[in-house]
Image: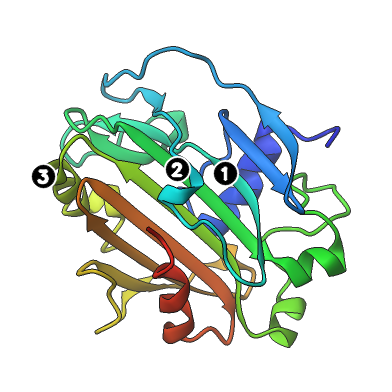
Amino acid sequence: MEGYTTEDQKTAMHRFSRRIVVAVAAMTVLVGGSVAFFIQAGSASPTTAAGSRTLSPTLGNSAGISSLSGMTLVESGSTPLTFHEGISSSGSFDEETSIGLPQAAAPTGSLSQIFVSSAAIQQFGPVEFSPVGKGLPLPVPVSFAASNPGPCEVSVRVIEFSSPALAQAAMADPNFTQNPEPGRTPIANAQIRGGTAVDIQSAANGGLDEIQFQWVQGAMWYEVSVAGSALTVAEAQQVADAAA
């Protein structure tokens, strides 16, 4: 994929997961099931200094969603994390694309995935992370989504902590979960595994509906965002429930 840059990927993925999706080093971008692009991350050990940015070891895809019917995995990698003190903003450059974590809660592993409708890839071509590209842009065009109702984009983030207590503490931190926040409306009785479910209204969705789920299972924190046209809660729940 000649001409792609890390910044292009940041921009495209930022539009989908609204402030928190990874598009940086240690990422493998997949198109049609084949490896198309790889950025080698440095081997420096993670640091927990306030405001610093780190990449935890990448978990295997089995830690997230292994596969989705009718969808293609187009991105898989680790999640960049910005540490902060208490629940205050880190103020770092990556504030808009990274999640904040208490300094003591250094993760032991993470995973970020993006799935896109296989039919959209067939119609538009491979996912194009560059804004000047000729392939499938993200978010998926609403004209395509409207004629193909239901999920068309799925974003998954998994963070592994050293203990269930740390995972629960992160889930209870509004700076970490971004709940509550303007544009995020809780959906009653739609939670998965005792977590949260929210409807996200954002101009960054390009007219698509988005439903996001967060929950904790053992020492693992999960977030699954599902986007599409005429998307129902039941459809989004079915997708999110596929996460380990």
Q: Splitting the image into 4 quarters, where does residue 207 fall?
A: bottom right
Direction from residue 63 to residue 221 in the image, left or right: left
Q: CB under 8 Å between callouts 2 and 1?
A: yes
Q: Residues within 10 Å of mark 3 (few under 14, many from 20)?
A: few
User: Any mark on residue 165, and which?
Assistant: 3
Q: Does residue 96 appear anywhere in the picture?
A: no
Q: Quick one: SS at disc 3?
A: helix
Direction from residue 138 to residue 103 in the image, left or right: left
User: Circle 2 sits on which residue?
Assistant: 111
Q: Earlier in the sequence, mark 3 or mark 1?
A: 1
Q: CB under 8 Å between callouts 2 and 3?
A: no
> In front: 130, or 216?
216
Rounded to the nearest angstrom, the CA distance separating label 3 from label 1 is: 27 Å
Give the residue drawn at x 43%, y 85%: 234
> In front: 145, or 122?
122
Q: Amino acid at mark 3?
A: Ala
Q: Residues within 10 Å of mark 2 (few under 14, many from 20)?
A: many
Q: Residue 184, how many percent across, how many down?
A: 36, 69
Give the residue drawn at x 38%, y 34%: 81
Direction from residue 97 to residue 188 in the image, left or right: left
Q: Quick one: SS at disc 1?
A: strand
User: Circle 1 sits on which residue?
Assistant: 76
Q: Earlier in the sequence, mark 2 or mark 1?
A: 1
| Residue found at the far top of this picture | 44
User: Any mark on residue 240, and which?
Assistant: none
Rounded to the nearest angstrom, the CA distance separating label 2 from label 3 is: 20 Å
Q: As displayed, is residue 199 above or below residue 6? A: below
Q: As displayed, is residue 98 above or below residue 118? A: above
Q: CB under 8 Å between callouts 3 and 1?
A: no
Q: Earlier in the sequence, mark 2 or mark 3?
A: 2
